[in-house]
Image (cartoon, rainbow, N blue to C red):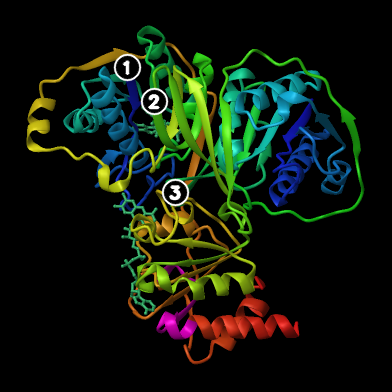
Amino acid sequence: MKVLVCISHVPDTTSKINFTSDNSEFDKNGVQFVINPYDEFGLTRAMWIKEKNGGTVTVVNVGSAETEPTLRKALAIGADDAVRIDANPSDGFFVASQIAALAKENNYDIIIAGRESIDYNGGQVPGMIAALLNQPFINGCIGLELEGNNAQMIREIDGGKEKLSADLPIVIGGQKGLVEEKDLRIPNMRGIMSARTKPLQVRPAIDSSSRTKVGDFEKPAPKSAVKMVDAENVQELVSLLHNEAKVI
Amino acid sequence: MSVLVYLENWEGKFKKNSFEAAQYAAKTAEMMGTEAIGVSLGETDDLAVFGAYGLSKVISLGGADFGQFDNYKTASALKSIAEQNSADTLIISGTLNGKSVAPIASIMLNAGLITNVTELPSSVSPLTLKRSVFSSKGFVNYSSEEATKIVCFIPNSVGVTEGSGSCEVVQGNVSLDATPTTTINEVDRIKGKIPLPEAERVVSAGRGLKGPENWGMIEELAEVLDAGTACSKPVSDMGWRPHTEHVGQTGIAINPDLYIAIGISGAIQHLAGVSSSKVIVAINNDAEAPFFKAADYGIIGDAFEVVPKLTEAIRNFKATN
Ligand SMILES: Cc1cc2nc3c(=O)[nH]c(=O)nc-3n(C[C@H](O)[C@H](O)[C@H](O)COP(=O)(O)OP(=O)(O)OC[C@H]3O[C@@H](n4cnc5c(N)ncnc54)[C@H](O)[C@@H]3O)c2cc1C
Ligand SMILES: Cc1cc2nc3c(=O)[nH]c(=O)nc-3n(C[C@H](O)[C@H](O)[C@H](O)COP(=O)(O)OP(=O)(O)OC[C@H]3O[C@@H](n4cnc5c(N)ncnc54)[C@H](O)[C@@H]3O)c2cc1C
């Protein structure tokens, strides 16, 4: 089984988000970068597949050299090899085109990406990779079991869930549920040592364009100060919600 | 030139999401000086009602292909209808199904895709939209100059107002591309509950509730408010509540009109998923809880005392209003 796990390199969830003074860019100053949380679930699931069915787990990132520590971390968790496609990605289509080109050469059985990258929240890359490869696409995937060449999956739908099946190869937009939080693999000392010598291949990007243009960033409007209501007087809250906030 | 909108149905029924999408398309079309056309797949309720939200026409596609949701078939149908009507803009509501269709449709149509959109376009030449990034900690203006554009907006972010009128409904005809097959074996929808992404009001509780046995009062408050229920991440991790209720940066991101947070501290990752709620109420026994900084209204007090009183007060209010 050849599994490709797509790894987005994102600001830690505790990061304060600031933009440069002309609002043209995200300010990376003092920001700690990590593996996108959704991709961590996919990576552990990929390790389980390899341990049960044999095969290899490759991780890929489309990014500049600064994402290499994130790929090394994925190697320390257990991936066999890493590919960095050298580019400064600017939208989901650009990223998906790069990963689809890699996949066309390597014929992965399963490509696991995250439901969403917590930086630009596009939710675009896995579906675009699937469509570029003309393979089944299961988004919001919270369960994956393999039976030979067939994958049994569970997907979140609005107000519930759905069980699906498809023949490999497939592309998944995954999240918690692929494995549980408590099962997430973290790098141990041996993993960290061996990650240093595992292959990390740098590939030039293929010629591809972005289909969207990024303009100015903005911060959300600051909240006005909270209005406190006495715990003995919940009636006042009801009046405020009705008369002032007009939500009930 | 025209604007096309995907009118998603749930077992044949339309919801606020579908009407919001229709109105979004109609307003965008008005800015462009053209018409907005709806596309509906499968057997559904009356489609003429979409006239009240500004559509000039709805094209309905029936038949075995659309009996169950299929992301590729939906994308392929949208592509075909877009070509037949020389549509250059496609509007999709960012429901879980919508998010599964949009990227595929963008590849089929060679379109520029802008997702996570929070407002109507600020300009239509070139098409420019504000979208949320960094889990609502920022916004950015995106534009696309591709010949075809797809806009996927966050449900409940622009709202909807009902007008009057009805529109023409026609049976469409498409030839679908051969697309990958995924088989749906079972659909399991939670009955009698308001799904979170579409809830206009949400009552949410955290570890301050001490244990799953105490959720009765949360459900009662939700019931009087006609609200959905949500929870913080540790609550779902411990299995006190189902995963589908986990909101936040790594759970569902929601933007209801009213969000009531009970016994939730207000960690940055929790706030990331709920801070776009229009009005936030925090109830916490710790005056220093960070949630009070993110809330519009706050009550310092023991949830076990405050919540039943609040439920009672709202019940009385509803009885007399
Ligand atoms: C203005 C701007 C500045 C950017 N600056 C940087 C930067 O400095 N450094 C940087 O690394 N990226 C940068 N990016 C790229 C960004 O991190 C995303 O990779 C890209 O925009 C796709 O985002 P998305 O929200 O559509 O991804 P989504 O579609 O939400 O991502 C879903 C999944 O796709 C996979 N995926 C997404 N992006 C990648 C990727 N790049 N490589 C491998 N797998 C991926 C992951 O599995 C992820 O969970 C920038 C993007 C923009 C728009
Ligand atoms: C990578 C990452 C991703 C994460 N993603 C998410 C996410 O998506 N969503 C999320 O929610 N969290 C997320 N977290 C976890 C987050 O950091 C917090 O740990 C979590 O939100 C805390 O949950 P809580 O507020 O229920 O519990 P606590 O922080 O324990 O807070 C309980 C609160 O209840 C109050 N309280 C106690 N007793 C009472 C009482 N009787 N009456 C009233 N109030 C009372 C306390 O004062 C306290 O403020 C994430 C963390 C990480 C590291």
The chain carrying label 2 is: A
Quarter of the rendering containing residue B73: top right
In the image: residue B203, left or right of residue B16: left
Disc 3 C-beta below 8 A from ligand 2: no
Q: Alpha carbon of mark 1 to alpha carbon of mark 2: how far? A: 10 Å
Q: Secondary structure at mark 3?
A: loop
| Kind of residue sitting beneath label 1 | Met
Q: CA distance from mark 3 to mark 2?
A: 33 Å
| Residue annotated with mark 3 | B135
What chain does badge 1 belong to? A
Whether label 1 touches label 3, CB < 8 Å: no
In the picture, measured across the screen, residue A218 lies left or right of residue A13, that is right
Instruction: Say which residue appears at 75% left-offset and 18% top-offset.
Output: B83
Give the labeled residue for mark 1: A1
Look at the numbered discs 1 and 2 and tell me whether their residues touch, using CB distance below 8 Å: yes
- The x, y position of residue A67, in whole percent, is 26, 30
Secondary structure beneath label 2? strand
Q: Which residue sits at x=43%, y=74%?
A: B214
Which segment did they paint magenta? Answer: B293-306
